[in-house]
Amino acid sequence: DAKTTQPPSMDCAEGRAANLPCNHSTISGNEYVYWYRQIHSQGPQYIIHGLKNNETNEMASLIITEDRKSSTLILPHATLRDTAVYYCIVRAHLSNFGNEKLTFGTGTRLTIIP
Amino acid sequence: DGGITQSPKYLFRKEGQNVTLSCEQNLNHDAMYWYRQDPGQGLRLIYYSQIVNDFQKGDIAEGYSVSREKKESFPLTVTSAQKNPTAFYLCASIGSTNEKLFFGSGTQLSVL
């Protein structure tokens, strides 16, 4: 399984863009990058995913480097409600679904500063 | 509304007792997962199941057992062999045509 590494914690001022990095240097060609976030004592919530192109949705943007060895999650205008732990994971393409061991790392604890 | 329901929200275990955490989903998902989370830590995989009557050990399966007799249900039993069971337990599921992993709201297990 591909592994991911993330900084343990980050701070960001309210209203600024929060940029959360993730390294996944052993990612395979058919593996997607997924981002989830977990607010204290709740189940993680899906944010966004991508394969090799940059992606944007109503929550965030995902920038994946050309060699796909790292990515950055961008929260364009951070609010206090964005304070959470953010997890970056990689998983195989859906065609390989059948024996998928989904593992999470320790994530990045993002604190939005008023 | 479709989703994953975990119960109970809080559970207390006595020494030497087995306890079972419930996880039910009505999303028609094939795969289900159990994770353990300790304070300030990430999620660690306990067991996962891709299909009814089949399941695989995750990274920390010792002291736990599961069953998958129905597609919608994936209960986790914390046995007396698990010497440090106090943790937050999360259940998740994903469908074969769905890209997103859905999580339940979790069960906090504590030892009396």
Image (tube, rainbow, N blue to C red):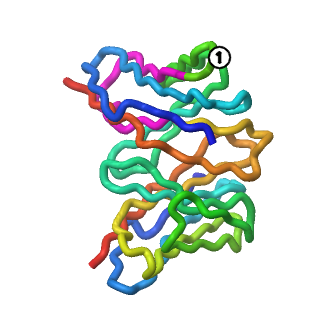
Residue A7, percent across and down?
A: 37, 30
- Residue B10 makes an appearance in the image: no
Which residue appears at 19% of the width and 24% of the height?
Answer: A114
Query: Please, which chain is the residue tagged with disc 1 on?
Result: A
Residue B43, percent across and down?
A: 45, 50
Identify which amino acid the numbered label 1 is placed on.
Asn
> With B33 as the anchor, is A11 left or right in this view?
left
Residue B28 lies, with reference to residue B8, above or below; the image says above
> Outermost residue, left direction?
A114
Q: Which residues are magenta?
A: A70-88
Residue B92: quadrant of the picture = bottom right
Q: Secondary structure at mark 1?
A: loop
- Residue A38 makes an appearance in the image: yes
Residue B17: quadrant of the picture = bottom left
> With A12 as the anchor, is B92 left or right in this view?
right
Residue B28, percent across and down?
A: 70, 56
> With B6 as the anchor, is B57 left or right in this view?
right
- Indicate whether residue B75 is drawn in magenta: no
Residue A40 lies, with reference to residue A34, above or below; the image says below
Which residue appears at 22% of the width and 25% of the height?
Answer: A113
Which residue appears at 31% of the width and 15% of the height?
Answer: A16
Residue B73: quadrant of the picture = bottom right
Q: Foreground residue, A10 or A42?
A: A10
Instruction: Give the class, few, some or many, for how many residues have Cα within 10 Å of label 1's Cα (few <14, many ≥20).
Output: few
Which residue appears at 36% of the width and 63% of the height?
Answer: B87
State which quarter of the image contains the C terminus of chain B.
bottom left
The residue carrying mark 1 is A53
- Indicate whether residue A78 is drawn in magenta: yes
Residue A62 lies, with reference to residue A93, above or below; the image says above
> Outermost residue, bottom direction?
B16
